[in-house]
């Protein structure tokens, strides 16, 4: 099920995002005593830094994974974990050990294999991981996670996590969840703001172009596109919820 939600502005997007996360977290904690959340970088960091302090939940039950990560030291400006460590810990009552991180001393291949082992602690090893919620980003070329247009990893179906050493967007070495795992999630969210994203939003939601972000279609889950009016500017009323 896909739901497109349009809010007036960025503040509205942040509130709606926080509301859906809160509901997802508390349902997961009620049912399984743990909430497994996948994070992406970019504007989501600020959205969560602004929105999460307002929600009510048992923070100790949260575990933060990464939809993709750059294979750089945690103190490097490109480290997604590093940005969350700097901007989220201290704003909400969570600790560093609630983040399931890569080993940044490894190569991309080693880091991907190691991350699969770390994930297996939280998911049954004989079936696909089923995240409670994945928070996804969308690049100007329509990429999501580190799954880029025309890249061979778009067709990967057997692995949970893959390395990439030829990312067209620097830094080149990364790890990424595959679509098999992404589309097995209970829910995925794109939270998109700004007129600069309007054309790509239209290409994905209206024109149905075959872009990586278009391939996010949870098989037995929900997909939310939360847009501000600027990002939804090229959609008609019938194309938004």
Image: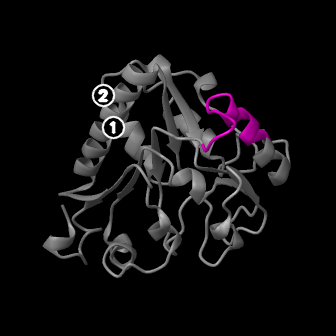
Sort mark 1 into few (<14), some (14-19) or many (20+) by Cα contacts within 10 Å.
Answer: some
Q: Secondary structure at mark 2?
A: loop
Q: Is residue 38 visible?
A: yes
Task: Quickly name the residue at label 1.
Answer: 51
Q: Is residue 113 magenta?
A: no
What residue is shown at x 70% (from left), y 40% (from top)?
Answer: 75
Asked if marks 1 and 2 touch (Cβ < 8 Å), the reply is yes
Q: Is residue 93 visible?
A: no
**Residue at image coords 68%, 28%:** 121
Front residue of 83/224: it is: 224
Write the start and end of the magenta stretch as one range: 114-128
**Which of label 1 and label 2 is nearer to you?**
2
Q: CA distance from mark 1 to mark 2?
A: 8 Å
Task: Please check the rendered image and state whether residue 115 is part of the magenta-colored stretch, yes or no.
Answer: yes
Identify the residue shown where x is 49% and y is 72%: 142
Q: Which residue is mark 2?
A: 55
Q: Position of residue 71 (x, y in %)?
A: 75, 50
Q: Residue furthest left?
A: 237
* Farthest-out residue, front: 126
């Amino acid at each position: 099920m896909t739901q497109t939600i349009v809010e007036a502005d960025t503040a509205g997007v942040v509130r709606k995002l926080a509301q859906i996360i809160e509901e997802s977290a508390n349902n997961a904690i009620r049912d399984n005593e743990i909430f497994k959340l996948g994070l992406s970088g970019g504007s989501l960091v600020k959205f969560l830094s602004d929105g999460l302090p307002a929600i009510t939940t048992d923070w100790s039950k949260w575990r933060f994974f990464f939809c993709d990560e750059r294979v750089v030291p945690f103190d490097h400006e490109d480290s997604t974990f590093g940005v969350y460590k700097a901007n989220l810990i201290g704003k909400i009552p969570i600790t560093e050990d609630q983040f399931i991180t890569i080993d940044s001393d490894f190569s991309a291949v080693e880091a991907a294999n190691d991350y699969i082992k770390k994930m297996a602690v939280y998911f049954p090893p004989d079936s696909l991981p089923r995240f409670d919620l994945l928070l996804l980003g969308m690049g100007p070329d329509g990429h999501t996670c580190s799954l880029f247009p025309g890249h061979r990893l778009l067709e990967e179906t057997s692995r949970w996590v893959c390395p990439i050493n030829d990312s067209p967007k620097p830094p080149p070495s990364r790890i990424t969840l595959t679509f098999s795992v992404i589309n097995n999630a209970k829910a995925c969210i794109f939270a998109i703001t700004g007129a600069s994203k309007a054309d790509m939003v239209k290409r994905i939601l209206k024109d149905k172009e075959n872009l990586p972000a278009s391939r996010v279609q949870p098989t037995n889950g929900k997909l939310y596109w939360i847009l501000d009016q600027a990002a939804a500017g090229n959609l008609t009323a019938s194309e938004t919820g």
